[in-house]
Each structure stands twice: as structure tokens, then as C-alpha cells.
Image: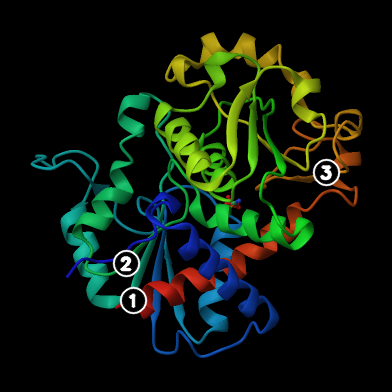
Amino acid sequence: MTIRHFLTTQDYSRSEIDALLTQATAFKRSPQGTQLAGKSIALLFFNPSMRTRTSFELGAFQLGGHAVVLAPGKDAWPIEFELGSVMDGDTEEHIAEVARVLSRYVDLIAVRAFPKFQDWTVDRQDRVIKAFAHHATVPVINMETITHPCQELAHALALREHLGELQNRKYVLTWTYHPKPLNTAVANSALLIATKLGMDVTLLCPNPDYVLDERYMAFGQQNARDNGGSLKVSHDIEEAYSGADVVYAKSWGALPFFGRWEQEKPIREASKHFIVDEAKMALTNQGVFSHCLPLRRNVKATDAVMDSPACIAIDEAENRLHVQKAVMVSLLAGR
Ligand code: CP
């Protein structure tokens, strides 16, 4: 039997996304339930988290389920992912055993595994979560790898709550400075969900090096065609912000510089003016601002923007709780 996972929203139709958002709204109105009574989820974190861990643990608890949190390599054995590997290095057990053993214990497995930031041709294969999905006999949920689909749903719900109908609203995904090169996952995800919702999307970034992976640009273009929206790239801050209904900020490392980050650093350092501030927000159509969090204040966005009524980042963070309940219940209902 084929197992339905939640690895990327590209595997879900527009109507399936709408159904998850409707279910999430119901959970927001009525947070407690028994839909996960007797069920359990393993949450595997290869990287740190605050929101994702808290919202998944509480979400399972509020619906009568139980979450087990594991950090492989820290409080659980380091895992080997290479097929045929002679395991005489640091790893203690193979994904083939880890995924199958966990599947005997729990009903869902959720995984956070960021890129290694050395070779994008390797990282873009998303090997860790794909290996879990391959070997597990229960549904697998992406808690952020090279996309962040749970964040997408939380973002979409917050936008619907604040703007109502999203069709052809102007959506700006703006790159912002950060002292370190960060994951492209949330940026990829922002493109996927905004285009899936039929918005007119502008990807604003300092230069063509910061355009996202061709796979996600192509998915965005396809989603835009399918849903009556659009997707374009701009390097012009004023043009991008003008008339925007949504400004979504994220920092990410330029893909052509993957593993050569010292060479990217001068470009990033020269682009600190991409910070989201009141002057830029004043160009918008009284637009809302959001970010997935965590956010470095006065680096990515100013205090004034973060503390303004336009900022819906806290609502988006809250929505993680509601949308993830919808995902867990939906995956189990399909079994
Ligand atoms: N947005 C998000 O995933 O937050 P955490 O990294 O704290 O989980």
C-alpha cells in the first residue's frame, strides 16, 4: 500500500491545501479533542527548533496523542544514510533500521534535517527525509529540510485571516541580510504556497545569484499558471514594494556560492539595506508583513516594523499549532 506523506505541498492539490486550512481553522476554534487518542508521533530534530518542537508536541497532546522527541547524534544514536556503507565511522545505526523500528512504535514520524551547506547538488536531493519516507511504514512529515511545508500552511492561514481572498494580491518575498548564509527552505516554500494560492509574486533579491533553485522557480511558474497568478524576479526594492499586499522576509545564502561562503560574504555585507523598515512598508498597499521566525531584529526587520499592527508573524507562528494538527489527523485518516 502506498503511504501518503507530507514532504512538500507540491504533492498536494489546491483543494487538498484548502481542506487542510479549513480543518486548521476548526482546530483554532476548538483546540482540544480526541482525534489522536492512542496515537503517537516521533519528532526527530537534526537541527534546533523552538516553534516546531513546541507546536508539534502540544498539538499531539491537545488531541490526545503523544510525541517522542529525539535528537539523533545527541540523545539518540547517530544515523547512517549511505546505502552499502561500511559503518566504521561515527554513525551507529542505519536509517533502514531506524525508520522501520520507529514505525513499529509510532504512527507518524516527523523530521527536521537542514542542508549541510557544502554542496547544493547534494543538499538539493533532500536525502535524509527521502530515506525516512523510503524505509518507514508510517507517514513522514517534513519539519523543514529544503522546504518547510508546515510553515507554508501557517503562513497561508495567517494571510487568509488578515486579507481574506488572496487571488492576485501582490506578494513580495524579499531577501534580507543575515550575518550567516541561511537555508533556502522557507524562501522556496514561500514561492510554492503564494503561487499555489494564485497570488502575484515578486521575488526581490540583491542580484541573480540569489534567485532560488531552478526546481522551485519552475514549480512556482507552474503553480502560477495553474492558479491564475504570476511569478517574477526583481532587484528593484522600490518597484517590488510598491502596492504590495504582503511582504514576507527571509534571508538565504546564494546558491552559486554554496560551500564557498567567504566569497559570498562581501555581496551579503553590501546588501544590508534590504532590511524591512517603515519607509519600505510605507510604499505598500497598507500591506501586512510576516516572517517565519526566529528573526534578528534591526538586521532583517526593524523594531518599528516588528511592533507595528502590520506584522502578523506571531499569528503565523501560532498557526503552526493548528495546521500541524490538521496534517497529523489527515495523514492518519488516510490509513
Ligand atoms: N519557524 C520555525 O520553524 O521555527 P523553529 O526553527 O523555532 O522551529
Quickly name the residue at label 1. 334
Q: Earlier in the sequence, mark 3 or mark 1?
A: 3
Q: Nearer the viewer, mark 1 or mark 2?
A: 1
Quickly name the residue at label 3. 287
Task: Give the quarter of the image for residue 247.
Answer: top right
Contact, CB < 8 Å: mark 3 with mark 2?
Answer: no
Kind of residue at disc 1: Gly
Q: Residue at x 16, y 56 (%)?
A: 96
Number of numbered labels in the structure image: 3
Residue 100 makes an appearance in the image: yes
- Relative placement, left or right, of 106 versus 47 is left
Quickly name the residue at label 2. 139
Q: CA distance from mark 3 to mark 2?
A: 37 Å
**From the image, which quarter does the N terminus lie in?**
bottom left
Query: Nearest the camera: 262 or 71?
Result: 262
Secondary structure type for disc 1: loop
Mark 2 burial class by Cα count in 10 Å: few <14, some 14-19, many 20+: many
